[in-house]
Image: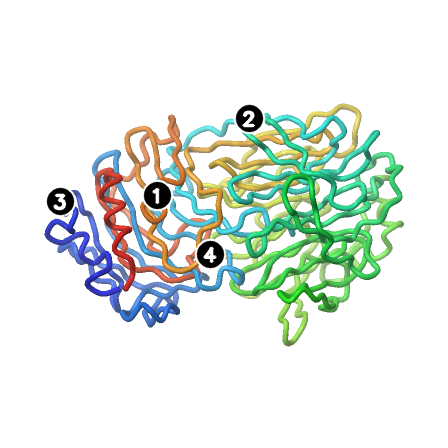
Amino acid sequence: MGGSGLGSEGGAGGGDGEGDGGLIGAWNLAGDGLDGSGRRRDARPVGGANFGPSTDPAVSRPVARLAGDGARFDVEGVAIPGPDFSMSSWINVPNAERSTIGDIAARFDPVERRGFSLGVHHGSPCGNHGNDRNLFFGVDSGTAPAWTDHGRPSASTIMVCALAVHDGSLYAATWEAGQSDTGHVYRLDDESWVDCGTPGQANAVTRLAVHAGRLYAGTSRLRAGGSDMSESTNPVAGGQVLRYEGGREWSDVIRLAGADSIAGLVPFAGDLYAIPMYSEGMFRGAARGTWSSSGSPGRRLLALGVHAGALYGAGNDHFDVASAIAQTAAGIVVPARSPEGGGGVFRYDPESGWTSIGMQPDTTQVYSIETYGDRLHIGTWPHGIVFRHERGQWAACGQVGDETEVMNLLAFNGKLYAGTLPGAEVRRLDDIGWTPVGTLDRTLDVRYRRAASMAVFRGELFVGTLPSGRVHSMTAGLVASDDRALGLGWRHVAAIRRGSAIELFVDGNLVGRRAGDGAGSLGLDRPATLALGGGPRGGFEGELADVRLHDRALTERHIRAAAARPPS
């Protein structure tokens, strides 16, 4: 990277005629955290952040290496005097399918919800891989959330089971009732839903995953009694994994042995993993196209997720499926099988198999897995409690309102959000508890309403519901996102605040822009700690080099010039 990298940007002119005006800090991270701007704002390594050779053999100089779990570089006393600023960096994510990637840089106050964060949405919070290496830049000035209703994908949709962002578009997988009674996948084009066909012939498509640049779907024969609804008239078994071929065409990949449902579909370490909903086991689809059993942790699983380089499964204590559904429909809480608690979370290693990382009190099912604040968080039934794993123990983060089930957890623009049952609520984790931000399904005369699926698209938090079968989206502050997967290898990223707008660039190209009141006073004029390779969701899992912070909005010419000097 050396002298031909971005280390020259803050020097005499940087080769583009704009000089170093407004440069607050310049951290080459070429073996140390020294501030090359001359302002003596050095970056201090925290939590195992270190320097070493890049995984890219073409890069000869040292780079900053981070592995999440609190590793970052802190720069103390950073203030941005005016409203405009620019943050840029070279980044490399060599192990994307073993990580949640995390935040590249942030100065964010989670209590006031003021500041900014730059990072990557990548993960599978409910066993559904909804965001695959989607870069984002978010700001907030403590704004009130606002919701938009994007309608119902079809007249027969009763549940939007999964949402996924692929190649610039949002896809919705549905449970259908009525005349069609066959699960579909739809694509949101502007504000219209386009039918992308029926993967398989079961009544629901329950999971979506983006893997190796392709969109996959998992099908299920959902048993409606678990939602206290009339059973489907469609008897066709699910348990299929299919790949999208464009238009309304899907190709068959595998049918899981002995399964008629898919509860999780997640890429990890180059392979695609799937779990059934009504039976035990996990299956691995290798890159060469073969599938094999990965065993069972001793109970059914409800979700899969990746955290800190490992694959995790969320446990389901309901052993007898028919009995559990009947009792749930009758309002009876099935007790946990384990005296120390139920549900359970299990870590999977391809070599050694499954390891329990503990049970949770007052819990029989774990529905969701998400990384926030560098810690593994889970959402549970039947008391609607979110737990955080730290120091080898599970700590309760409180009940989400009066709800009984936390179906989804998703980190968005600096905060953690939960989607619930039976009220189809979305709530935000604050220091005072779980703050309500929306009730998305108000269908009358039903026992259960679900905020059933989540993903981030067009800089908004999208949520699918049951039984109304609608899709809603929430803004909180402003978020600019790249809805195409970030390319592998070294990439130049830049985040710009320009007046009332924010802009996001990759390799010198504008990939996202949002404007509005959410970019008000961010509180950045007060000196505080700037995190490099860290932020509210969690530490960056990758490599950083040549980080720059300016107190002005750089021109597109300047950004293109910086991106044209690639790592050497």
Q: Secondary structure at mark 1?
A: strand
* Quadrant location, the C terminus: bottom left
Query: Dots 3 and 1: beta carbons under 8 Å?
Result: no
Identity of the residue furthest to the left in this view: 12
Q: Is residue 362 visible?
A: no
Identity of the residue furthest to the top in this view: 444
Q: Position of residue 567 (x, y in %)?
A: 29, 61
Q: Position of residue 340 (x, y in %)?
A: 72, 62
- Crowd tier of the residue under label 2, counting other residues whose Cα lies within 10 Å: few below 14, some 14–19, many 20 or above: few
State left or right for residue 443 relative to residue 268. Answer: right
Mark 4: amino acid: Ile
Distance Cα–Cα, label 2 vs label 3 = 44 Å
Which sits earlier in the primary sequence, circle 2 or circle 3?
3
- Per the image, the residue denoted by label 3 is 17
Mark 1: amino acid: Asn
- Per the image, the residue denoted by label 2 is 148
Distance Cα–Cα, label 3 vs label 4 = 34 Å
Please identify the quarter of the rendering in which residue 230 is found: top right
